[in-house]
Amino acid sequence: GIFDKRFEGFWTFHPLIPTWFHALFVQLFGLDLRLLRFASLLCGAGLLAAVFSVSYQLSASSRCAFIAVLLVVVSFAFILSAHHIRYDIIVAALAFSAIAIHLAASNRKSVLLSILAGLLLGMAFEVHVNAVIYGPVIVALFFAEERWRFYCQRVFWGFVGGAAIALAWYLCAHVVRYPETYFGIGRAMAGTHYPPLLLGSPLALIMAVAEMGRYLMILTQFRIVVTLVAGFMLWQRRLARKELLMFLIGFISFGLMVKNKMDYYLILIAPFADIVLA
């Protein structure tokens, strides 16, 4: 009742991919809450497949991959998000699929797969800007694989190209037609959504870290403590370095870039911990 009166073309601010996805279910099955929840469950199945692929490619163990999937399935984050009609489960499914395809692209030196990984991550960003937390994760994986030579690799620039294509589409869909509307609504929401990293205040960063600890301890029922102990043991034995890197960078990125630590956002990072624990 406010944006539609003040901002011309206000609808262009909202994401297209989840709107189309949910509209398809409404078109096929009618406006039924249970069936719309099934849409989220379907995305949850996609997330589980991506988690299996990531864990299997990193551990070369199908048993480890199955355990990772089982840990995700019984987690609070998955049970909540797979039944909510929200965008977060779509973001997680797309982003972890992007990570899985990135790992395959790096192993096969496939530029096409790398472009696809970039496209998927860009699509996740279109669904919700919180997907920005996965960018540092994939860059860190590139660094772990090639060290400082990663920017000389064709697969890296393939990933950048795929992400750039998705970003260009994002700009055309949301910014170009009504730029004043996009930035105006963005400024209106900045007070409650501005990332702690960009506030320029050491106190804001300290509060973000403290909030992150409280958030994880409550929502994971203290399982995060077990994961941290397991991670320390793996690090000492020089095992699972990529899994630990994803876990560390993912959690830091989430803490610094996502201001509101809502319970339904946990699905964005919880699978990283489950992969390490597996």
Image (cartoon, rainbow, N blue to C red):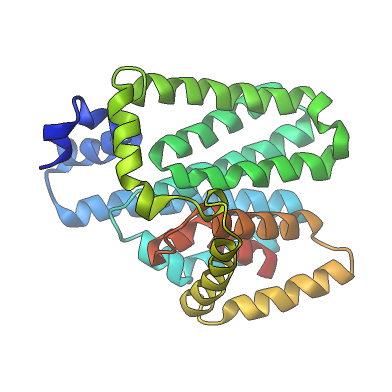
Q: Is residue 7 above or below residue 248?
A: above
Please state if 122 lies on the left or on the right of 114 as rendered.
Answer: left
| Residue 67 visible (yes or no) | yes
Q: Position of residue 157 (x, y in %)?
A: 71, 23
Q: Is residue 61 above or below residue 103?
A: below
Q: Position of residue 231 (x, y in %)?
A: 75, 70
Residue at position x 16%, y 43% in the image: 29
| Residue 96 visible (yes or no) | no
Q: Position of residue 28 (x, y in %)?
A: 18, 37
Please state if 191 lies on the left or on the right of 152 as rendered.
Answer: left
Residue at position x 58%, y 39% in the image: 98
Please state if 188 lies on the left or on the right of 261 as rendered.
Answer: left
How many numbered circles are shown? Answer: 0
Q: Is residue 218 above or below residue 179?
A: below
Quadrant in the picture for the C terminus: bottom right
**Front residue of this view, candidates 90 and 166:** 166
Residue at position x 35%, y 39% in the image: 186
**Front residue of this view, candidates 163 and 180:** 180
Quadrant in the picture for the N terminus: top left
Q: Position of residue 244 (x, y in %)?
A: 74, 60
**Front residue of this view, candidates 254 and 157:** 254
